[in-house]
């Protein structure tokens, strides 16, 4: 047995590290690679699928949620073998278009929320819900339905409040005009302030 001094071992280790002998491993890359392998196993279970179809399908599956992946693979099973390649391409192109449209709608929602335009937000949420269901993402669609419901309730409460506020304002204006006609200008000014 040889005994190597500890300092020498550490010195050689750090000199190797400086020369990039040890390549750092990024966790995100490892997670993505593991996910790819799991997806590959799922896709390869589909009977009669060729490698080109697998690659094309993998690109879409990596962008999808788990729920959407299951929906796509189940849909793939329904395709006839002879038509599978063409139908798969059509389906994936359609899914990409749906994702693109949904992303654009999400951007619109952000802008409308900043502008407090809740009516338009609810309408766009309905579109996003439909698009999410088309991708097979029912849990996301349900979450968005719940959010849209909250906004609808807020809109209906505001719609019920507006007539009450309008009548209070009109009453204060009428009272202010009566006070003004009576020559009580200070009280009339207070009522006009209250009405505004």
Image: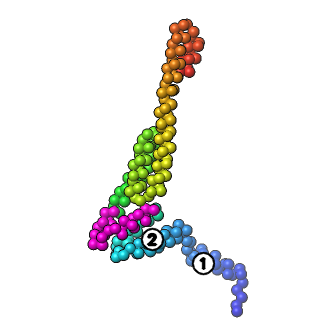
Q: Is residue 146 visible?
A: yes
Of badges 1 and 2, nearer the viewer stands 2
Percent across and percent down for residue 175 are 53, 15
Q: Is residue 90 magenta?
A: yes
Q: Is residue 100 visible?
A: no
Q: Residues within 10 Å of mark 1 (few under 14, many from 20)?
A: few
The one nearer the camera, 192 or 174, is: 174
Q: Secondary structure at mark 1?
A: helix
13 up-or-down from 77: above or below: below
Residue at point 43%, 47% (across, down): 125
- Give the position of the N terminus as an image quadrant: bottom right
Give the main secondary structure of the magenta stretch.
helix
Determine whether, in the image, residue 177 is placed left or right of residue 2. Answer: left
- In primary-sequence order, the first of circles 1 and 2 is 1
Q: Most extreme residue toward the left, as rendered?
A: 82
Disc 2: which residue? 39
Q: Residues within 10 Å of mark 2 (few under 14, many from 20)?
A: some
Residue 12 picture quarter: bottom right
Tell me the number on the disc at residue 16: 1
Magenta span of residues: 67-91
163 up-or-down from 85: above or below: above
Determine whether, in the image, residue 174 is placed left or right of residue 16. Answer: left
Residue at point 55%, 7% (across, down): 183
Q: How is the image coloured?
A: rainbow
Residue 117 picture quarter: top left
Q: Is residue 149 magenta?
A: no
What whole-number distance in Å separates the C-alpha atoms at marks 1 and 2?
37 Å
Percent across and percent down for residue 33 are 49, 71
């Amino acid at each position: 047995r040889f005994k190597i001094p500890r300092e020498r071992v550490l010195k050689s280790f750090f000199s190797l590290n400086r020369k990039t002998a040890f390549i750092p491993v990024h966790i995100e890359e490892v997670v993505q690679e593991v996910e790819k392998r799991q997806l590959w196993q799922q896709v390869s279970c589909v009977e009669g699928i060729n490698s080109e179809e697998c690659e094309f399908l993998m690109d879409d599956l990596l962008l999808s949620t788990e729920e959407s992946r299951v929906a796509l693979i189940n849909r793939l099973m329904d395709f006839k073998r002879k038509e599978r390649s063409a139908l798969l391409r059509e389906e994936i192109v359609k899914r990409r278009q749906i994702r693109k449209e949904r992303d654009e709608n999400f951007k619109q929602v952000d802008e409308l929320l900043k502008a407090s335009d809740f009516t338009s937000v609810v309408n766009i949420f309905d579109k996003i819900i439909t698009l999410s269901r088309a991708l097979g993402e029912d849990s996301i669609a349900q979450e968005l339905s719940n959010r849209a419901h909250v906004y609808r309730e807020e809109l209906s409460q505001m719609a019920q409040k507006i007539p009450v506020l309008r009548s209070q304002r009109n009453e204060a204006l009428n009272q202010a005009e009566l006070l003004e006609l009576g020559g009580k200008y200070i009280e009339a000014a207070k009522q006009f302030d209250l009405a505004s």
